[in-house]
Image (tube, rainbow, N blue to C red):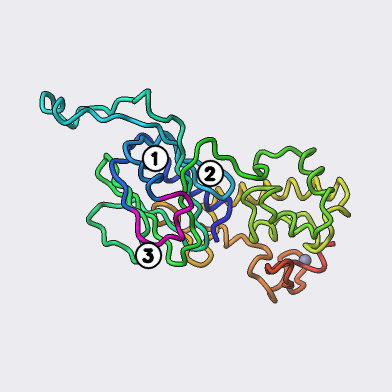
Amino acid sequence: MPELPEVETIARGLASQVRDDVIESVWLGSKPEPLKSPASQIVATLESSRIVDVRRVGKHIVFDLDRVARTPPSAKSFRHARSEKPRRNRHAQQNSQWIVHLGMTGRLLLCDPSAELAKHTHAILTLDSGRELRFVDPRRFGRLSVASGFEAAGAEPLEVELEMFVNVFRARKTPVKSALLNQSLLSGVGNIYADESLFRAGLLPRRRAASLTREDLRRLFLSLKEVLKEAIAAGGSSVSDYVDASGEAGFFQLQHRVYGREGEPCLVCKSPIKRIVIAGRSSHYCATCQR
Ligand SMILES: [Zn+2]
């Protein structure tokens, strides 16, 4: 499942490619699962909207939209159609957003309309630039919706301040690993980056969050931001079939110190990396380096 660094990489890639493009038409498939808003509402919101920006909020990709009104065809014949800039329609709803959650296997592909249609394509946006933006998701855990003023439930890990971080974690009696994964506390941290930041902070994943000292939490706070920033710089982690918006793999998996390394020697002390299950999720750690 793509986590914060992967979604950030995808959103940045898309923003550089589709910012200021206009969505001309929308096709939605017949499978109900990917649609979190009614199909008619998604189509009405997206069609004739300019993509103002694409950004990450938690693990969601948010397309900020601005309604545009096209010049009527009758008026177009007096001028060159391609030189027409879509006008802003002051009466249409402003500040709508298209929200994409990639789930386990969701992908957004920007391609030429002649490109072969992938199996499990659930949405196709035809853009004014002549390209198509397609949503493909074999396992159908991804979700498409429309909103205005969308916000993630939890705090943004790259922006949260130390005081808030400490207060949130000290109030939790759950294992610190579970608290890191709790999307209503922090948005976008998943299994890989929770394990990696706990290793760097020297904390065992099953420690109760409320039992951690302020100094423990300060180390975790710094480790989490460091790991996320390094992963974003590396283009995310390519585990399973993750690729970014232009089909490029990420490289942060080469820097994983514990995640996916069960039985391999710890890079610091050579003890074998262990794996336990906490709240149904695998946790990888070094029993010597983490306390
Ligand atoms: Zn170790």
Q: Is residue 98 left or right of residue 258?
A: left
Q: Earlier in the sequence, mark 3 or mark 1?
A: 1
Q: Which residue is mark 2?
A: 56
Q: Which residue is mark 1?
A: 45
Q: Is residue 274 above or below residue 180?
A: below
Query: Which secondary structure is most common in the magenta stretch?
Result: loop
Residue 178 image point, x, y percent:
74, 59
> For the point 67% across and 45% down, which residue is it?
154
Residue extending farthest to the left is 78
Residue 246 image point, x, y percent:
39, 52
- Which kind of residue does numbered mark 2 sit on? Arg
Q: Does the beta carbon at disc 3 come under 8 Å from ligand 1? A: no
Secondary element type, mark 3:
loop
- Which stretch appears magenta? 28-38
Within 10 angstroms of label 1, few (less than 14), some, or many (20 or more) residues? many
Residue 228 image point, x, y percent:
63, 49
The answer to if 29 sits in the magenta stretch is: yes
Front of the two marks 2 and 1: 1
Based on the displayed image, in which of its 4 quarters is residue 48 positioned? Answer: top left
- Which kind of residue does numbered mark 1 sit on? Thr
> For the point 43% across and 50% down, which residue is it?
38
